């Protein structure tokens, strides 16, 4: 009963978030698709034509990276301000606060799904066939989601008392963008650093997704499990942290 | 079964200081201290206390929104809190969408809301606006929406924080009835309200919170009266600020409303202005709601303050009686002062209220006010403030007079006004009496005979009173003249002439009034139409010289045949001394009958009066008794001016002198 109500609330909030996001712009949902495409075009021009990186199916390669990274950056950035924005309800209505964070991430996730449709259109255009292994894509998406959610839990719970976080986080996102194989292949990273480099869950998620969608590799079970464990760990820690802090939100805001 | 149990709840907040010093930047502020109570299933608890006493914090702790710093909360059952309605609504969404959103926030599943949607909309009374965006709603409308949605949920425990103190009256009643229903259905309720009435009707228990501590807990009546006593002590000076603020807001809104209507009328109705007009009309609608809401909260405030004052009045009355018994003069004086203060506040409150209440209520309030003022007057006898209260009372009575249509009541009121005025006069402040007031009263409406006569009676009494005081002053003046204190005498002279001036005005006023009645009168057989003074050659004048010919002409009108009428005249000196009172009967001047108009003359060939002002009463009465057909008491005056015949006193008595020397 409880959980069902929570799910119900999450759905209501998510729909509202998504509706509100594009309520006052004329092209509406298109923006959530247009942004990564524009980014793709820029990066493609710079790195494929000017820098002449030699990566097979570089457009698709880039697109996956951009889509995933965009999701992370959008979801986490909005998450920081969530509690403040919903201060009124938190202070005055007794309801599960985590719902706010979940539904905000979910509405970013909807954008991600829309972007993936573009990706699949691209595979048709560039004639990259999908193989059976692509069927495990939802698994990666869920991993990505809980990872991002975990981070969002942390950020949203810390931000109300530590406003400097927004600057620090945007800086971290910038670093993250370059230490994640979005525009280059992880094979370009020197061997001795690769071990540490691959602790980055975003790097793992993006890589493995590319493997199944573009390069038709079947991922190693061991690697998959490591990714899963990292994501779950971050999710659980984030959730616990959030729950520990949540009784005090009403007075902190 | 205990549904809510609180044990030693303490809640502290960290307060951040403005000063930038890292040490002691935060200070603990205790919002709640050691709160313990429990509530059984089906019980209703009222929480009262002033703003900032911790009521809302307590509710939030029970609701689980805040975590107590120490102590334990145990709540069993599905709980719904109305800490503040309207949060969580989305202004960009329609009313309908918001029902779903708010329902979800309260934990209502979507399909359940769908099922109940119609009854929710019905209860809210917002059917017309349900598909309009929420941001076009007034707060009252939002409350309706939210409350209706929330009530469809089926909670076991309800926490209500003054939420139903918003919105207009009809919806309030509806919501309050709903709460009563829930209570009757065995729901447990914790109820914060400023309306003591509501708490009395719903609650089984009440808590009086002060500074985060439970001051009293127990039966609502007891707790409420303790609370109100304390409220009065702390707030007695600011009661009116709140009221006036609200009143100002209302009048501002009303002005705005007029402006909008004006600008709508000015705007040409064409395609370009359609939106503008539409939005203006919407604005008007919204303002209407706002005004209603304000009015309602104003009347709530009134009721509360009135209640506070009345209870405190009772308390002081008890204490006073006790003090009287003990004959403790010090405390009697103190208590009497307090009582006076409360009466004064109560009075002012009601005076404000009169301006804003319905007509039906008005009369009731006026009666209460009258009682209050009389009570105050008892206190004030012989003090400087008495006159103020008397004036207020007079104004009130005049107001009442204006409104009443019942003749008998009117007469009674006039008598009251008269009494009040005489009291004012007796206090020596007759100058405070403004003739203009009476004039206004007359101009405002055509008065009928009874009213006119009432006013005439007042005027007459006033004139008599002035006569009295002139007489007194003259005596004093004489004394000073004898003791050769010229300055003092001159002072009195001044005063006397002032009074005379006033009297003259009043007499004029009364004459005018008299003329009015004469044309309207019908219920008497004979009327005095006018009275003139005639001098030599029967020229009209009211200035005579001693020894001159003096005639009083009485114009009468007999509406039907009257047998053996008697015409009487009274001549009085300024100071009221009756000089002479002749009538046709005494003088054996027989009139067999009169019918229609006619004139009666009374002539003194040689007026034996000396310099001074004289008043004349004229009456017509039957032969056998003195109940007059008509009487004009001291309505007319004439003057006797200086003569070449020097003399002292009042009378010029024809006489001659003799002398025998040796």
Image (cartoon, coloured by chain):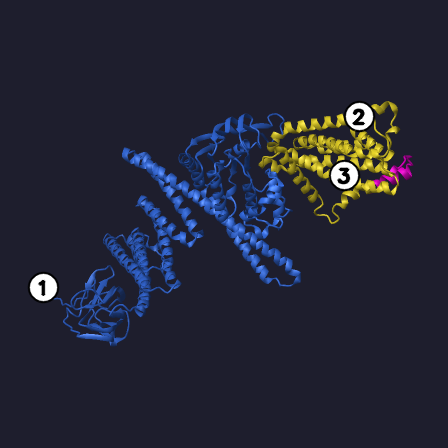
Q: Which residue is mark 1?
A: B661
Q: Is residue B417 left or right of residue B291?
A: left
Dividing the picture into quadrants, the one containing residue B598 is bottom left
Q: Secondary structure at mark 3?
A: helix
Q: Colour of chain B?
A: blue
Instruction: Report how far apart the C-alphas of labels 3 and 1 lie in the structure.
Output: 144 Å
Q: Tell me the subunit letter for badge 2.
A: A
Question: Taken as a whole, is the magenta stretch helix, strand or loop?
Answer: helix
Q: Please state the horizontal and vertical placement of residue A234, each as a whole percent of the image.
A: 73, 27
**Residues at marks 3 and 1 touching, judged by CB atoms closer than 8 Å:** no
Q: In x, y percent, where is residue B81?
A: 55, 37
Residue to which mark 2 is pinned: A199
What residue sits 43% from the left and 44% below the top? B303
Residue at far bottom of view = B537
The span shown in magenta is A38-58
| In this rendering, position of residue B138 left or right of residue B618 | right
Residue B383 appears anywhere in the view: no
Q: Nearer the viewer, mark 3 or mark 1?
A: 3
Q: Say yes or no: labels 2 and 1 on the same chain.
A: no
Tell me the crowding category of disc 1: few under 14, some 14 to 19, or many 20 or more residues within 10 angstroms, Cα based.
Answer: few
Residue that label 3 marks: A112
Question: Same subunit under labels 3 and 1?
Answer: no
Farthest top residue? A192
Question: Quadrant of the rendered structure where residue B325 is?
Answer: top left
Nearest to viewer (mark 2 / mark 1): 2
User: Left of A148 or right of it: where is B410?
Assistant: left
Q: Is residue B42 visible?
A: yes
């Amino acid at each position: 009963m409880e959980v069902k109500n929570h799910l119900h609330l999450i759905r209501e909030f998510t729909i509202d978030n998504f509706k509100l996001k594009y309520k006052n712009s004329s092209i509406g949902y298109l923006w959530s698709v247009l942004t990564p495409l524009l980014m793709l075009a820029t990066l493609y021009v710079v790195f494929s034509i000017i820098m002449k990186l030699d990566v097979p199916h570089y457009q698709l390669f880039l697109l996956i990276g951009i889509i995933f990274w965009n999701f992370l950056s959008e979801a986490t950035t909005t998450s920081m301000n969530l509690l403040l924005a919903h201060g009124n309800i938190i202070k005055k209505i007794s309801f599960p606060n985590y719902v706010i964070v979940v539904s905000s991430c979910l509405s970013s996730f909807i954008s991600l799904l829309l972007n993936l449709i573009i990706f699949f259109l691209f595979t048709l255009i560039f004639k990259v066939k999908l193989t059976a292994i692509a069927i495990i894509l939802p698994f990666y998406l869920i991993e990505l989601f809980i990872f991002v959610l975990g981070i969002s839990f942390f950020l949203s719970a810390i931000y109300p008392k530590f406003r400097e976080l927004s600057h620090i986080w945007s800086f971290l996102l910038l670093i993250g963008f370059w230490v994640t194989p979005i525009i280059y292949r992880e094979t370009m990273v020197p061997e001795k650093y690769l071990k540490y480099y691959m602790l980055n869950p975003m790097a793992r998620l993006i890589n493995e997704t590319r493997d199944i969608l573009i390069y038709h590799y079947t991922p190693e079970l061991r690697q998959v499990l490591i990714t899963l464990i990292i994501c779950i760990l971050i999710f659980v820690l984030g959730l616990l942290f959030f729950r520990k802090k949540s009784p005090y939100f009403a007075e902190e805001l | 079964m205990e549904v809510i149990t609180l044990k030693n709840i303490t809640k502290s907040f960290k307060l951040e200081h403005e000063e930038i010093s890292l040490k002691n930047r935060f200070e603990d502020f205790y919002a709640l201290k050691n709160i313990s109570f429990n509530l059984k299933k089906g019980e209703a608890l009222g929480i009262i206390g002033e703003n900032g006493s911790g009521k809302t914090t307590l509710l939030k702790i029970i609701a689980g929104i805040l975590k107590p710093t120490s102590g334990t909360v145990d709540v069993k059952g599905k709980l719904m809190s109305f800490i503040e309605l309207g949060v969580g609504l989305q202004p960009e969404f329609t009313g309908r969408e918001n029902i779903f959103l708010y329902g979800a926030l309260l934990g209502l599943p979507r399909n359940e809301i769908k099922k109940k949607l119609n009854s929710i909309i019905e209860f809210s009374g917002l059917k017309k606006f349900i598909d309009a965006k929420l941001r076009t709603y007034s707060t009252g409308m939002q409350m309706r929406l939210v409350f209706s949605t929330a009530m469809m949920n089926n909670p076991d425990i309800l926490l209500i924080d003054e939420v139903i103190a918003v919105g207009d009256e009809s919806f309030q009643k509806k919501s309050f009835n709903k709460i009563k229903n829930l209570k009757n259905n065995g729901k447990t309720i914790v109820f914060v309200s400023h309306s003591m009435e509501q708490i009395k009707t719903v609650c089984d228990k009440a808590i009086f919170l002060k500074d985060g501590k439970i001051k009293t807990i127990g039966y609502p009546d007891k707790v409420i009266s303790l609370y109100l006593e304390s409220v009065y002590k702390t707030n007695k000076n600011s009661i009116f600020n709140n009221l006036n603020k609200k009143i100002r807001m209302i009048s501002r809104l009303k002005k705005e409303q007029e402006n909008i209507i004006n600008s709508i009328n000015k705007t040409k109705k064409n395609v370009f202005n359609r939106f503008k007009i539409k939005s203006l009309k919407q604005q008007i609608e919204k303002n209407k709601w706002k005004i209603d809401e304000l009015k309602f909260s104003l009347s709530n405030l009134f009721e509360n303050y009135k209640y506070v004052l009345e209870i405190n009045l009772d308390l002081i009355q008890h204490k006073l009686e006790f003090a009287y018994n003990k004959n403790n003069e010090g405390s009697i004086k103190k208590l009497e002062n307090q009582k006076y203060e409360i009466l004064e506040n109560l009075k002012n409150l009601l005076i404000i209220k009169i301006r804003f209440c319905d007509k039906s209520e008005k009369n009731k309030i006026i009666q209460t006010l009258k009682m209050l003022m009389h009570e105050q007057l008892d206190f004030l006898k012989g003090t400087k403030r008495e006159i103020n209260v008397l004036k207020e009372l007079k104004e009130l009575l005049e107001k009442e007079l204006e409104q009443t249509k019942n003749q008998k009541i009117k007469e009674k009121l006039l008598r009251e006004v008269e009494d009040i005025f005489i009291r004012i006069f007796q206090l020596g402040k007759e100058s405070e009496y403004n003739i203009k007031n009476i004039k206004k009263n007359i101009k405002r409406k055509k008065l009928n005979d009874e009213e006119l006569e009432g006013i005439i009676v007042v005027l007459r009494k006033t004139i008599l009173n002035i006569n009295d005081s002139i007489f007194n002053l003259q005596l004093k003046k004489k004394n000073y003249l004898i003791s050769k204190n010229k300055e003092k005498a001159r002072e009195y002279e001044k005063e006397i002439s002032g009074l005379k001036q006033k009297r003259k005005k009043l007499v004029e006023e009364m004459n005018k009034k008299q003329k009015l009645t004469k044309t309207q009168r019908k219920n008497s057989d004979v009327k005095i139409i006018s009275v003139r003074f005639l001098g030599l050659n029967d020229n009209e004048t009211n200035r005579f010289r001693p020894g001159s010919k003096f005639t009083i002409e009485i114009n009468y009108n007999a509406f039907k045949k009257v047998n053996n009428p008697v015409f009487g005249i009274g001549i009085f000196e300024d100071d009221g001394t009756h000089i002479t009172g002749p009538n046709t009967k005494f003088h054996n001047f027989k009139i067999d009958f009169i019918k229609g108009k006619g004139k009666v003359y009374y002539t003194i060939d040689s007026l034996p009066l000396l310099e001074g002002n004289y008043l004349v009463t004229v009456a017509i009465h039957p032969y056998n008794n003195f109940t007059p057909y008509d009487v004009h008491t001291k309505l007319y005056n004439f003057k006797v001016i200086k003569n070449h015949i020097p003399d002292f006193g009042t009378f010029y008595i024809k006489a001659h002198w003799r002398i025998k020397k040796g």
